[in-house]
Image (tube, rainbow, N blue to C red):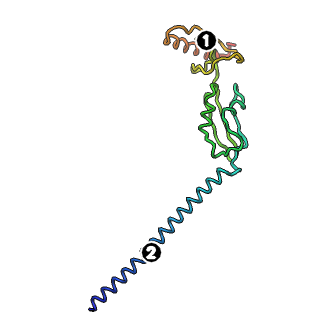
Amino acid sequence: MSLLRKVNLEVQKYRLKRRSRQISFDLLKASILLGTVGGLAVAMIWTYAFVLSSPYFRIRETVVRGCKELTEKDVLAVAALPPGTNLLACNLEKTARAIRRNPWIREVFVGRELPDRIVIEVRERQPIAVLKHADGLFLVDREGLLFKRLEGMDDIDLPVLTGSEGSPETERALFGQSLALLDFLGRTQTFP
């Protein structure tokens, strides 16, 4: 074998050895990176499960603000938030939707106060009149929304709007004017 051939073989061996070291080093780096990412993922999943089952974040108190017509018990009954539910696991939007189904509720905000409290703020509809309709008597708010059918046990002292037998356009116009008049009279100090 010639000297040149021997040198070429030695150079190739050296290059292979160097390449194999580089590949081994790259594999080691990739393994460490994958191990770290996997470890972090497992730690995050464990932490999530721990927080959702921790007694520290259990609902101990539910505060309801803004009730006038409704009682706190009425709001809590439709909210369906049993004590002991995890604060972070409860669906606030679902709770707000359930509360909004009550005809007296105009707006609702449901929020968390860490570590153990749910706050429910409601804005109720303010009736300004009773509308006599073909289907019965209904409470009407400032926006003209019929929001609740009157029942025998309702104790309401409001003006009654009647005469809704014309065309829908005429009814809507007269109804709007009646509400504007009631709104004006409600804001003046001289009208009882």
Question: What quarter of the picture does the C terminus occupy?
Answer: top right
Q: Secondary structure at mark 1?
A: strand
Circle number at residue 132: 1
**Residue depicted at x 67% and y 36%:** 80
Distance between mark 2 and mark 1 Cα atoms: 86 Å
Which residue matches tag 2? Answer: 24
Quarter holding the N terminus is bottom left
Foreground: 106 or 189?
106
Image quadrant where residue 134 sits:
top right
**Image: 21 above or below 138:** below
Residue 111 picture location, percent across and down: 64, 40
Contact (Cβ within 8 Å) of mark 2 with mark 1: no
**Residue 135's x, y, as percent?**
59, 13
Going by the numbered disc 2, the residue's amino acid type is Ser
Residue 62 vs residue 181, the one in the foreground: 62
Mark 2 secondary-structure assignment: helix
* 63, 154: nearer the viewer: 154
